[in-house]
Every structure is written in C-alpha cells, then in structure tokens.
Image (tube, grey):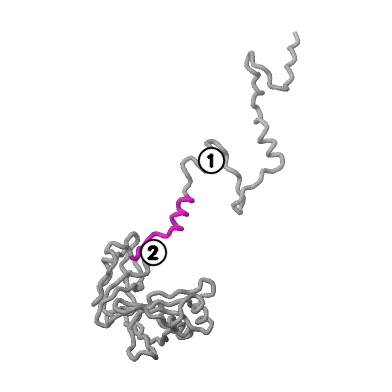
Amino acid sequence: MSKKQFTLNVAARANTGRSASRRLRKVNQVPAILYGKHTKPELLSIDGPELTRLIKSIAGSASLLELKRTDKAEAALSFLQEVQRDPITDRFLHVDLHEVKPDEKFEIRVKLSLTGESFGVKNQSGVLETSNQFVRIRCLPKDLPAFIEVDVTELKVGETIHVGELKAVPGVEYRDDKSQPVVSCVEPVAEVVSAVVATPAAGEGAPAAGAAAPAVGADGKPVAPAAGDAKAAAAPAAGDKKAAAPAAGAKPAAGAKPAAPAKK
C-alpha cells in the first residue's frame, strides 16, 4: 500500500455563477473550490488536460495533492473530495478539494482492494459479492494508505468479512461500524435457479398409471404412428364385446334414433 502524493497547479478565480463556469470550460479550464477546517473556501480553476492526467495517475487510490499557485508561495496540501462530470459528455464540470494539515488527523474514504483467491471460489464454485467498495478511515496525512487490502484467501461459501475483521494498518483508524459487511462468498444464483426449474413438482410431469410411453426413434424424438395405427387404436380390440345397451329407463342421447323393436 504505497503512499502517493501528486502536484497540481491551480489558479485563483474571482467570478462565480454558471455563466462564469461555462466561460472557464470553453477555454479548457475546470472550476474548483478549496475548503478546509481552518481556512475559508477559495475559488480556483484547474487546467483541463492536467486534471485528466492526474485522474488517470491516481487511478482510484487515496492520494494527497500539493496545490501550487502563482499568487501564493506556500503550497496547500489537499485531497480530491469530489469530481463532478457531465453524464453525457463525461467532461469535468467541477472539483471539490479538501485541505488538510500535515500534523492533524482527517477522515477520508479509501477504496478496498481484494487480494488472493478465495477458497470458496476455487473449490466450491462460489462467487464473491462485494457489499462496499470504500471504507472510512481516520489518519494523519503521512499515514494515508493508497488502498485498504482485503485478503479473501480463506473465505468459504457462506462466509463474510466485516469491517471489524480488516487487517490493522499502522496509524489508521476504521470509522465504519465493525459489523458492516465488506465482502462475502455466496453460491452462484444461476445454479440455484436451474436446480429449482429442473425438479418437477410432486405429481407433475409423470405419466398416468397404465399409460403407454410414446414411441421414440433413434434420434430420441417421438415417432408418429403409422397410417392405420390411429384407427386401430381408436377401434375396440378384437374379441371385445359390443357396447353395452343403456340401462333400463335411460333416455337416448340427443340426436340418437330410438332402437327398432325386436321382431316377435
């Protein structure tokens, strides 16, 4: 977990408002603000290409920025609190910089970095599920880690690593609740769903008692009955008795002709 510090050139700006911010962006400048616990908010502007290079270099790590200005000899120490982008063009709209003091502790959100191969993933077909990508810490600027590493090597299916189980880092205090989950190893959802679908409900899908199984060809597909077989199947078997006469007193079916009286 290397500690990184970068240099960023900034300039003071006097004008505020949407119109002034639009004019800055037209000349490839990004409006920014610097604020801190012991200083008043200051309006600044940052060169667009320089900010793009800085964001790529930081790559999501927690990093300190040394702000250099032409109007002040002393450089301010800060970190990126928030970077606003246009949701369509992805251009930088505004940057919030939080000033810190070298001898004073501060709070910051640091990204979690998973290390190792989980036992549950490797041997139990499990899947890692991350509950939080960041964790809040409190430390001095000199103790700021770029990431908080989370070793998942021993994590099995059904187990979870919580904030209280994170590895201790010298000079760093975790500020989130100790019971807050960080990463879990769970069973893959697709396999659970497919197992439920593959198991028919009781009484469903089974052929009726005594029903003949359909004929199956060499390719595994059902074979249609041959010509004449359908009629044979519908006709009564040879030797079967004629249909029994209706019970005494029963009315004939609708449309059926009454039987002729027997000859004496």
Q: Earlier in the sequence, mark 2 or mark 1?
A: 2
Task: Please name whichever residue, 72 or 103, is drawn nearer the observer in this view of the structure.
Answer: 72
* Residue 115 in view of the camera: no
Instruction: Tell me the SS state at disc 2.
Output: strand
Quarter of the figure with residue 155: bottom left
Please name the residue shown 66% across and 17% down the image. Answer: 251
Q: Which residue is mark 1?
A: 207
- How far is disc 2 from disc 1 in space, using C-alphas? 43 Å
* Residue 9 in view of the camera: yes
Quadrant for the N terminus in the image: bottom left
The x, y position of residue 178, in whole percent, is: 27, 64
Task: Please name whichever residue, 98 or 182, is drawn nearer the observer in this view of the structure.
Answer: 98
How many discs appear? 2
Q: Residue furthest front?
A: 15
Please name the residue shown 29% across and 78% down the image. Answer: 38
| Three-letter amino acid code of the residue under disc 1 | Pro
| Three-letter amino acid code of the residue under disc 2 | Glu
**Vertical order, 207 against 99 (above or below):** above
Residue 129 is marked as 2
Instruction: Tell me the SS state at disc 1.
Output: loop
Specify start and end residues of the magenta stretch as a single range.
182-198
The x, y position of residue 95, in whole percent, is: 42, 77
Quarter of the figure with residue 109: bottom left
**Which class describes the residues within 10 Å of circle 1: few (<14), some (14-19), or many (20+)?**
few
Quadrant for the C terminus in the image: top right
